Image (cartoon, grey):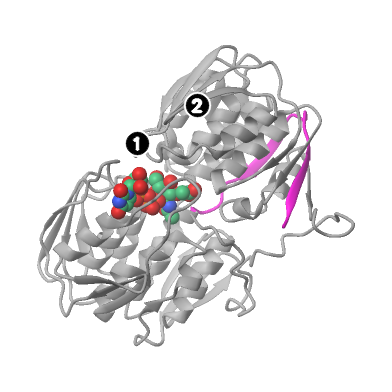
């Protein structure tokens, strides 16, 4: 398994652009199942999760042609309705096919996603929403089996103990586009990825109002057509690189920065001493050019993760790496996934002074981190360890970076172009040789080759 060898202590400087959003692309790809004509998505990031979703859709008779981040999906065999465990276990977002399959093909058999490294991650709200639309849902041999001759619009409360659900909203929203009558989703997720999905579906002929607010209204239509849609920039990737600039006392210009989607993050980073300023006159506040600069002295902070527009859980680990080096005590509370703290023990190995109690971590700032071998256990935790490695004195080896490849396109290449010193190695090879990211199908030209690997046993 690949690892990163990082020589810490270099300051990042230069310019980079943010890729399209993984978490926006995945439900949009699944929504192509609803269409009677081809759906083209542009700026889809070339990541292993995207390859896995292409493979899943291919098995479901929705064939994908991928070329340099542009994917065209066409339904060629609508008789397929079974999303197998082998694929679903590689990627939790496979659950996104449930709503579209049910609405369009009247039947879906989707392997129940298991827990992940940071918690149980149930899908009860997805099922509750689809049942409210009239679906019959049963669990058979570990598979969710959903059937409905015709979904019927209704009012659905989709909130749960931890607030709204992003992919649950995506599933119910997608299914309701073809339901008979009007559906109202209350306590819908407000994330930009949901707005982008609604924009795609509306361009396909759906009638959705209110996406981005907690109440979404969907008037069902008889059929959906094709369209050509550009996916929004990835706010989590953008935030990660901004924090990378902060932790290395760097100076970065970032293009395609979704400024409006990161207001909670830019506000908090500003208080800490990492400044993100718009330096363009773009009309689109969700795709701007920003300059990120950092003060040498970082202030401590108190932060609680929240659903959008609050501070995202997907940047909690990266922020914690930064706060390890602040002058004073910081407190981070995780309200979305109370167990999402596997990076804490690894940061401690690098000299961080952290105390965790339940969903809260206190970071007592230290003057420096020291390089060490550390192990990544999930996608954002891996990014946190890479950032810590960039700032640390000496050499850090981050193992199991396949997690990172799920969410960041060639991160080591992007960072090296900004002055970082990161080598991708394979510690299992007899000579520990330098590696290229072979496990990742970069969705280059043509269809996804059958040889694409379902390489990971633990999904998120
Ligand atoms: N929840 C339930 N029941 C459900 C669904 C969710 O109780 O049926 C709970 C979850 O356990 C959690 C909370 O509700 O406590 C929110 O979970 P949500 O359903 O919103 O998460 P998700 O839709 O499965 C997406 C992202 C995650 C991101 C979360 C929260 C994708 C593919 N995944 O997951 O992204 O952390 O929203 O913003 O969009 C990542 O990119 O690293 C990642 C994990």
Return the x and y of residue 63 as percentages of the image width and height: 47, 80
Graded by Cα atoms within 10 Å as few (under 14), some (14 to 19) or many (20 or more), the crowding at tag 1 reads some
Q: Which residue is drawn at 53% across and 14% down?
A: 329
Question: Which residue is the site of mark 2?
Answer: 356
Tell me whether circle 2 and circle 1 mark residues in contact (CB < 8 Å): no
Residue sitting farthest toward the front: 141
Question: Depth check: 438 or 411 in front?
Answer: 438
Return the x and y of residue 243 as percentages of the image width and height: 58, 32
Horizontally, residue 188 falls left or right of residue 360, namely left
Q: Is residue 124 above or below residue 448?
A: above
Q: Residue at x 60, y 68 (%)?
A: 443
Q: Can residue 193 be seen in this view?
A: no
Residue sitting farthest toward the right: 431
Is residue 19 inside the magenta stretch?
yes
The quarter holding residue 208 reads bottom left
Disc 2 to disc 1, C-alpha distance: 25 Å
The residue range painted magenta reads 1-21
Return the x and y of residue 430 as percentages of the image width and height: 88, 59
Horizontally, residue 333 falls left or right of residue 208, namely right
Q: Quadrant of the N terminus?
A: bottom right
Question: Depth check: 370 or 211 in front?
Answer: 370
Q: Which mark is residue 309?
A: 1
Q: Residue at x 24, y 67 (%)?
A: 175
The quarter holding residue 135 reads bottom left
Question: Depth check: 454 or 16 in front?
Answer: 454
Return the x and y of residue 70 as percentages of the image width and height: 53, 67
Tell me which label, 2 or 1, sits earlier in the chain: 1
Q: Is residue 424 above or below residue 202?
A: above
Choose mark 2 or mark 1, whichever is in front: 2
């Amino acid at each position: 398994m690949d690892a990163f060898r990082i020589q810490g202590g270099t300051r990042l400087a230069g310019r980079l652009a943010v890729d399209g959003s993984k978490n926006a692309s995945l439900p949009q790809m699944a929504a192509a199942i609803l269409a009677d004509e081809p759906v083209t998505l542009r700026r889809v990031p070339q990541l292993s999760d995207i390859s896995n979703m292409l493979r899943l859709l291919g098995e479901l008779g929705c064939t994908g042609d991928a070329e340099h981040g542009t994917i065209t999906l066409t339904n060629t065999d609508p008789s397929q309705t079974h999303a197998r465990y082998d694929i679903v276990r590689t990627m939790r977002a496979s659950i996104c096919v449930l709503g579209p399959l049910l609405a369009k093909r009247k039947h879906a058999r989707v392997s129940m996603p298991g827990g992940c490294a940071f918690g149980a991650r149930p899908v009860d709200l997805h099922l509750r929403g689809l049942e409210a639309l009239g679906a019959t849902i049963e669990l058979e041999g570990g598979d969710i089996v959903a059937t409905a001759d015709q979904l019927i619009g209704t009012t659905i409360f989709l909130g749960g103990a931890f607030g709204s659900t992003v992919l649950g909203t995506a599933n119910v929203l997608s299914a309701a586009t073809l339901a008979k009558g009007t559906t109202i989703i209350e306590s819908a997720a407000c994330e930009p990825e949901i707005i982008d999905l609604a924009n795609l579906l509306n361009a396909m002929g759906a009638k959705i109002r209110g996406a981005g607010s907690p109440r979404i209204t969907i008037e069902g239509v008889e059929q959906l057509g094709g369209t050509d849609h550009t996916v929004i920039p990835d706010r989590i990737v953008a935030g990660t690189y901004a924090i990378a600039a902060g932790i290395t006392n760097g100076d970065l210009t970032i293009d395609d920065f979704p400024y409006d989607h990161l207001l909670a993050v830019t506000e908090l980073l500003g208080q800490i001493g990492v400044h993100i300023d718009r330096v363009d006159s773009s009309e689109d506040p969700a795709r701007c050019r920003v300059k990120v600069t950092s003060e040498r002295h970082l202030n401590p902070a108190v932060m609680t993760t929240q659903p959008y527009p609050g501070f995202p859980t997907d940047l909690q680990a990266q922020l914690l790496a930064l706060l390890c080096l602040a002058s004073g005590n910081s407190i981070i509370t995780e309200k979305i996934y109370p167990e999402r703290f596997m990076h804490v023990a690894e940061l401690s190995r690098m000299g961080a002074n952290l105390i965790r109690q339940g969903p809260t971590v206190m970071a007592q700032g230290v003057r420096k981190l020291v390089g060490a071998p550390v192990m990544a256990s999930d996608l954002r935790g891996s990014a946190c360890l890479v950032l810590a490695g960039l700032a640390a004195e000496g050499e850090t080896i981050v193992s199991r970076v396949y997690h990172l490849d799920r969410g960041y396109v060639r991160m080591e290449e992007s960072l090296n172009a900004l002055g970082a010193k990161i080598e991708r190695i394979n510690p299992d090879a007899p000579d520990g040789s330098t590696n290229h990211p072979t496990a990742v199908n970069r969705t280059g030209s043509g269809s996804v080759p059958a040889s694409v690997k379902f390489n990971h046993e633990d999904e998120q």
